[in-house]
Amino acid sequence: METERSLSEMTGEEILEYLKELRKNRENAALDRLLEKARKISEKAMGDSKKAPTMKSMQSLIDSVGEDDSEC
Amino acid sequence: MLVVDEKTGEKLYYVDHSTLSTFQTCKEKCRLNTVEHLVPQREYLPFTFGGAYHAGLDMLRESNDLEQAKLNAIKYLKKHESSMELNMDSAGDRRSVERCLNLIAAYHERWKNEIFEIYRSPDGKAYTEIGFKIYMGDWVDNIPVMLCGTIDAVVRDRSGGSLWGVETKTTTLALPTFIKHAKPNVQIGIYDKACHEYIGIDIKGFIWDCTYVSDRKANATGSFWAMQGIDLEKDFYRVRTTRSETDRKELMFDLNASITDYLTWYSKDNIERWPRNGASTGACHNYNGCAYLSICESNANPNVISSLYQVKEWKPWENKPEITYSVENRIMKL
């Protein structure tokens, strides 16, 4: 995680770069959370059925991954 | 307020819409600002945020270069030694550098296919940040009174060729309500009159161009703009507003009355303070509270003033054009 920076200690270009990086980190963190969620769902599906996922369980997995996770 | 023009050495009374509007809402606030020249030590974030956003848009209008626009906004914040936080999600206030830059990018996206284009002079210079000062007549001490202001931009309708002034505002009020402030609106009225009668740009009206400063956090799994805390449809509204000849005449009546009222108080000697009428007009607590509230609450305790405020003179003549637009036959008398 980046440490907090202040306006006065950076040039304009550095600030733009820092904010780009900040956004990328946010997106990566959100993606990690989604992947973790998907992994758990997948594990649960496998554990429940003791067999390969069906089209139905895959669809449920895709739907849950596609959810808008506004708490992130 | 009375100033000595640094270029000519001439004494002038300068008034602008902001001074007159402050005077209407609280006379004492106006005195603290325009007579005592007091400004709070602590940064007033809505002011610096709005200034940076305008600096960014000004560059965007002139160059159409988004990167340069963002850099210009940062330059403004640095020039004003702003302590605004960078990160939108960790900022204690809804105003952060990140939100300001995101709004500039979103503004560009929202209006890039609009029907208007920046109006340019034959030599290619963009009509942006057009400063003006209008001679309103002489005060009772024979010192000229100048009404000054800065118009954000003039744009041209690509379909019909008509010209429109633009006034951009940032607000935390809901935009469906805020766009109703387009008329009546003294600031727009003054700018409209300046364009028509003094600067000589035949505008059809003004575009009241509003940007909502939200407190939305970045939604990292949302759409491209949601990731930046922006709602492209809800955060930007525009409305066209026009003024008739009668509107302009009525405006002059109101302006003459409020300038006379202001200068009457301004010219009073040996007076300790002006009336504190902010409590009855709502000015004390509107918009996160008046910047001078501590002074009134402490009944002008000198220790409060010296620790929380600094003296900084307003220089309205800066960034204003050399030309003065004259008005004939309008001599102000008490």
Image (cartoon, rainbow, N blue to C red):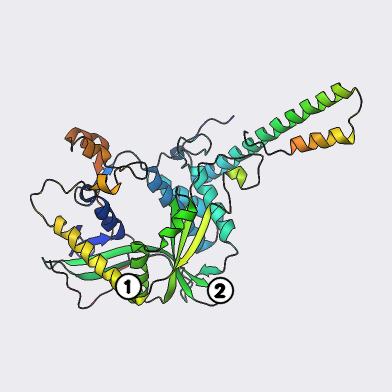
Q: Residue at x 26, y 47 (%)?
A: B280
Q: Residue at x 53, y 36 (%)?
A: B89
Q: Chain of mark 2?
A: B
Residue type at tag 1: Arg
Secondary structure at badge 1 equals: helix
Residue B67 in sight: no
Residue wearing tag 2:
B158
The residue positioned farthest toward the front in the image shown: B280
Of badges 1 and 2, nearer the viewer stands 1
Residue type at tag 2: Arg
Give the image quarter of residue A19.
Answer: top right
Q: Nearer the viewer, residue B178 or B4?
A: B178
B107 in relation to B215, above or below: below
Q: Mark 1 or mark 2: which comes first in sequence?
A: 2
Secondary structure at badge 2 equals: loop
Give the image quarter of residue B205.
Answer: bottom left
Q: Is residue A63 left or right of residue A69?
A: right
Q: Position of residue B31 (x, y in %)?
A: 20, 50
Disc 1 and disc 2: Cα gap in Å? 27 Å
Q: Position of residue B264 (x, y in %)?
A: 14, 59
B322 in relation to B107, above or below: below
The C terminus of chain B lies in which quarter of the figure?
A: bottom left
Q: Residues within 10 Å of mark 1 (few under 14, many from 20)?
A: some
Q: Position of residue A69 (x, y in %)?
A: 66, 36
The residue positioned farthest toward the right in the image shown: A51
Residue wearing tag 1:
B248
Q: Chain of mark 1?
A: B
